[in-house]
Image: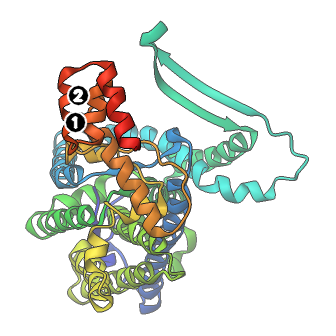
Amino acid sequence: MDSALSDPHNGSAEAGGPTNSTTRPPSTPEGIALAYGSLLLMALLPIFFGALRSVRCARGKNASDMPETITSRDAARFPIIASCTLLGLYLFFKIFSQEYINLLLSMYFFVLGILALSHTISPFMNKFFPASFPNRQYQLLFTQGSGENKEEIINYEFDTKDLVCLGLSSIVGVWYLLRKHWIANNLFGLAFSLNGVELLHLNNVSTGCILLGGLFIYDVFWVFGTNVMVTVAKSFEAPIKLVFPQDLLEKGLEANNFAMLGLGDVVIPGIFIALLLRFDISLKKNTHTYFYTSFAAYIFGLGLTIFIMHIFKHAQPALLYLVPACIGFPVLVALAKGEVTEMFRWWHSWSILHLGFLRYESSAEILPHTPRLTHFPTVSGSPASLADSMQQKLAGPRRRRPQNPSAIYEESNPKDPAAVTESKEGTEASASKGLEKKEK
């Protein structure tokens, strides 16, 4: 995962070209300010709109469209997996020809980029289609096996409008594949970021803290401890970073001296900010206090990163500044409002009672003996009645339902001595007598 903000004086060249900064004229203050400001704006857009779309995504009733849920176990493993991947890429670039590796990666991200960009622009493009547009439904289905053993591998539903969006995205894909232009790179990078914030959901605030804390250490180590991350970022010809030329004012669209921001610095804080937006909605106070607080904290953290990088003229691990800001600011607000406990317990109560649309199958990975809720009944009434209803649903699966009627009566009224005696006899007649006593 590329997660470093690069000093524009040592930025990567377009299409993996030479990075010797001595051959480049010094950048103007205006060009540097434009590059920094553009990177900040490009980082904010996918976080803001991705968070809003994550709410609609989580409310979807179709199980196949549910977002991917990150558990605390996943969060703890992620920095280790990311470190292995980063080191593997570094060794590949050292051992094998960079040209062939980038050709393979370009084809891979060409396909992924088209799909991601198509999914991103689809909601906006739907507004431009006339009502008379002939929109037909299609389904792409791949299965494995037959009969009762048949298993779905791919089940994708789309329509004619989606095909139009796919065609437009393919044009951008071909442009990127042939030219590796920085604008095409940014279009794909923005699409990846927005889809990541929208579709990757944390199951609670504690998981978010584990994920951000682990990647905080990961980012600091690989940027300050080694040159691995910066080397991979400059050698990796794939839209895994947002770039903007600092010499745009001098060279126009053919500029090649870039400042860059890794997508990890956008997506990782972004999914935590999106989680806080869903927490705001669960409170039903018509305010988005925690969302706006964390969003402002992200602006502060990234701005501080840019300032430190400009002063020291060295690539900075952006998560070093983003993680304390994005976690610290909302927690301080929760302390001031007395909602810290509520925030960290939200996964257990608030998300079920008020939102009712999060996935809880993953909770079994953390608490294997906890009953899982796969269906949320429609209930009405006060919050207290909703809580009672959910408690009954939680308590229900824990009881064993014996087939013997006397045993059923024994469970429902265990303190009745007559019922206990009758249940031991195990006859249907004694069970009916006990029921009559209960009615009297």
Q: Is residue 53 left or right of residue 197?
A: right
* C-beta proximity under 8 Å, tags 2 and 1: yes
- Badge 2 local density, few (<14 within 10 Å), some, or many (20+)? many
**Element type at mark 1:** helix
Residue 345 placement (x, y as % from top left): 28, 67
Residue 78 placement (x, y as % from top left): 21, 52
Task: Say whether residue 21 is visible.
Answer: no
- Badge 1 local density, few (<14 within 10 Å), some, or many (20+)? some
Q: Which mark is residue 418?
A: 1
Residue for badge 2: 422
Residue 375 placement (x, y as % from top left): 46, 43
Q: Viewer-proximal residue, 142 or 313? A: 142
Q: Quadrant of residue 301?
A: bottom left
Q: Quadrant of residue 184?
A: bottom right
Residue type at tag 1 = Ala
Is the residue 297 above or below the residue 399 in the image? below
Q: Which mark is residue 210?
A: none
Q: Which residue is painted at 20% across and 86% down in the image?
A: 312
Q: Spatial distance from mark 2 to mark 1, Cα to Cα?
A: 6 Å
Q: Which residue is painted at 45% across and 53% down in the image?
A: 199
**Element type at mark 2:** helix
Q: Viewer-proximal residue, 9 or 127? A: 127
The quarter in which the N terminus is drawn is bottom left
Q: Is residue 405 left or right of residue 367?
A: right
The quarter in which the C terminus is drawn is top left
